[in-house]
Amino acid sequence: MEVLSPQDKECINRSIRDIPNFPKEGILFKDISTLLSNTEALTTLMNHLEKRYASYNLDYIAGIDARGFIFGSILADRLGLGFVTIRKQGKLPYETYSQSYDLEYGTDTLEIHTDAFANQSAARVLLIDDLLATGGTAKAALKLIEQCGAACVEACFIMELTFLEGWSEVQVPRYSVLDIN
């Protein structure tokens, strides 16, 4: 299993900007736009993920709306795999499965096309997103993958806010590049 060196981890971590009190008072927002614009950090991250997942025998990568699309599509291209979008409600044009989940301030819904994995029985899928916080979004995405008849072999997050214990909602193996305490 590919492990990120402390130097590479620091390169990625330094590239993520902290925005205090966004989107509301008391929240320290982790802004990945600075990671995306930092060629060294993004290349370091994607090289690491490519090495980690090259031997997983995956069929697809599924990314959660919207930042998971960025990392997931890059990784899918590098591994020669299909990429599947898991989107916010009402954004997909074809027949969908839907899964609602709780937020700190209400509920939201994710959707996936019913034929997202080309009706491939037991497709092996990697789920990817930028952040694992309370785990509700990831849990909903995992249910959608399962509803399509696919199997999520691992959930990957660029950052995990470990103090929120979102890992308890993720019932598949998970990997977080950066743990934020």
Image (spheres, rainbow, N blue to C red):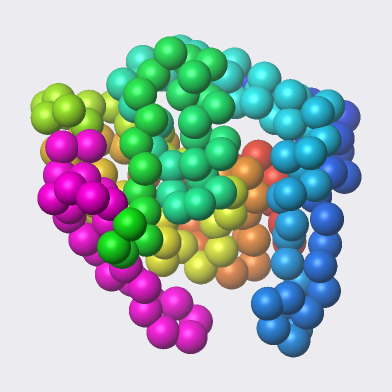
**Residue for point 82% across, 62% down:** 18
Asked where in the image residue 91 lies, by quadrant, the reply is: bottom left
Camera-nearest residue between 73 and 170: 73
Q: How many labels does the image show?
A: 0
Q: In this view, does 155 lie to the left or right of 11?
A: left
Res 133 quadrant in image: bottom right
Magenta segment includes 3? no
The image quadrant where one finds the C terminus is bottom right
Q: Is residue 74 left or right of residue 155?
A: right
Residue 19 appearing in the image: yes
x and y percent of residue 125 in the render? 33, 31
Q: In this view, does 88 lie to the left or right of 147?
A: right
Decide if residue 100 is on the left or right side of residue 2.
left
Q: Position of residue 180 (x, y in %)?
A: 72, 57
Write the residue at 56% across / 39% down. Answer: 70
**Which stretch appears magenta?**
92-116
